[in-house]
């Protein structure tokens, strides 16, 4: 008598990909001396896992590189976000 074995596998890991409206722009950062991506305060807070108030605090202390574009919205260098500790 032959026995038939059946193997079933269930994946338990899951990856979520969340797409957001791209709000990044490319600009030259004087401090980094290269072209970088820049984002507004809201997007910077999202990237740095913090809140907008902390981002403005970092702007005030010079921890992030900023450029003011037309209007008064500061655009924050994404490269400089890597070094902040909030
Ligand atoms: Zn920079």
Image (spheres, rainbow, N blue to C red):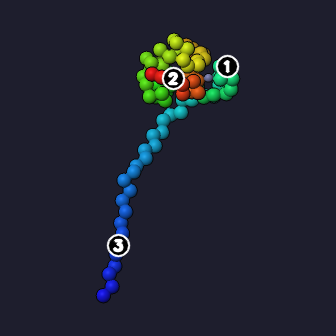
Residue to which mark 1 is pinned: 30
The numbered mark at residue 77 is none
Ligand 1 placement by image quarter? top right
Mark 2, other Cα within 10 Å: few <14 / some 14–19 / many ≥20: few
Residue 33 as seen in the image, left or right of residue 9: right
Residue to which mark 2 is pinned: 84
Using the rendered view, name the quadrant where residue 1 is placed: bottom left
Give the residue drawn at x 65%, y 23%: 32
Task: Check mark 1 vs ligand 1: CB closer than 8 Å? yes or no.
Answer: yes
- Could you say where residue 75 lies in the image, as x and y percent from the top left? 56, 20
Q: Residue furthest bottom?
A: 1
Residue 5 as seen in the image, left or right of residue 44: left
Which of the two discs, 3 and 2, labels the residue nearer the N terminus?
3
Provide the secondary structure element on which disc 1 rests: loop
- State which mark lies toward you, 3 or 2: 2
Mark 3, other Cα within 10 Å: few <14 / some 14–19 / many ≥20: few
Residue to which mark 3 is pinned: 6
């Amino acid at each position: 008598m032959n026995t038939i074995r059946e193997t079933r596998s269930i994946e338990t890991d899951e990856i979520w990909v969340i797409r957001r409206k791209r709000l990044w722009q490319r600009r030259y950062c004087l401090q980094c001396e290269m072209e970088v991506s820049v984002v507004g305060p809201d997007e910077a807070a999202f990237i740095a896992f913090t809140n907008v108030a902390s981002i403005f605090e970092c702007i005030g202390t010079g921890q992030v590189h900023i450029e003011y574009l037309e209007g008064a919205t500061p655009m924050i260098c994404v490269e400089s976000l890597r070094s902040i500790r909030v």
